[in-house]
Image: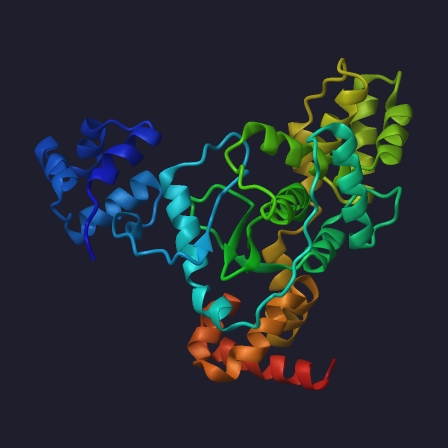
Amino acid sequence: MSWEGEKLKTIAKEKGISLTELAEVLNVSRQTVNDWIKGQVPKGNHLIGLSQLLEISPRFFFPSEIPGNISVPLHRKRGVAKITGAMKQEAAHMAKQYEKLFKWAPDPGLVPVLRTTHRDNQNAIAMASSLRELSGIETHKPMDYEHAFCLLPSIKIVTIFGYFPKSLKGYAFYCKIHKHRVVFVNNDTNVLDLIFPLLHEAIHAIRDEEDNKFTDRAEEDFCDSVADCIQFPEEYVKLVYHTIKGRRKAVQINLLKDFSAENKHSMFGIIERLKKISPALDFAVGGANTNLKKGFPSIGDILFKDQDPRSYIHNVRMLSPLFFDIVSKLMNNVTTRKVGEWLGLESSLDAKQAIEEMRNATSGIGS
């Protein structure tokens, strides 16, 4: 593997760390850092120190070739995080771990595409309506995470769960691997925070056949609008607005928290929709939203709830049926270790038990 030391200067700048500061923290000379940039490979302890300081994986400096059958555009990041070279590389590396799975998987065939002539509010509402119908959600209900996961397989998106590295500051990201539409989901994500990113990535998936304007600001804004309309139908937004209208701010916040808890969504999203009705509405709900999320699990908590292979496989099958089917078809052709890697299981014992449960599930035993 080749060492790409010049990336050190770029990632340090992105993190706001000067090379002099970096040298001081690692207790090396500034010349040593220059040598690393010019191509000298750091010693093991220095490489680990670099990775921890810059919050990246050591493999960032030892890039492996990403096959042409993988595309990782990267759209939405968490909060105000900016997309960086380290993020792109980490996302591409995660996708590469599944390159053979999708190479060997059955061809996805024709995939649904939603096209629109104009990226305006009217078309956003129309597209949202079509996708809400596919999810099976009631017309007046806001989207919850269960129905968001129901939507993905209906538009032939394969969901893969895993714990993201720190440098990949996101809840989910979309990519294509051997013609398959894939969304990777960060297991650390609270289910309330996951709904909007899932919808946003799903919209990119069904529009990437039409155009590849992943860096187009207008396209990002349009995908945001569609996701907003999917998550919060107009009828629900108006109900919330008329319920809180004219009340004291403290009462409004409590009512918003009640709506959010009952309907399983973050407070921030509904506030953004309410502002489109009344721009004067302005709430500081960070604390209330944090307390709200304490009552809801992360997606990883749900997957590994009982720490039992049967429960885990059942949860994977429910949340990502396409992924379950693909792994089930291929698990007898690869090693137990490889199946464990695909399923995100750390031990061979867990993988063996999971494989047995998948066999039982596909044969109808214990279903």
Residue closest to the eye, 312 or 116: 116
Residue that sits furthest to the top in the current view: 280
Percent x, y for residue 87?
A: 41, 43
Residue drawn at the location 56% of the way across and 73% of the way down: 327
Percent x, y for residue 191?
A: 66, 48
Using the rendered view, name the quadrant where residue 121 is placed.
Answer: top right
Percent x, y for residue 60?
A: 30, 48
Could you tell me if residue 28 is visible in this image?
no
Q: How is the image coloured?
A: rainbow
Residue closest to the eye, 205 or 60: 205
Q: Which quarter of the rendering shows the C terminus? A: bottom right
Could you tell me if residue 27 is visible in this image?
yes
Above or below, comparing residue 355 to residue 63 in the picture: below
Percent x, y for residue 111?
A: 65, 58
Residue drawn at the location 34% of the way across and 31% of the way down: 14
Q: Which quarter of the rendering shows the N terminus? A: bottom left
Above or below, comparing residue 325 to residue 32 in the picture: below
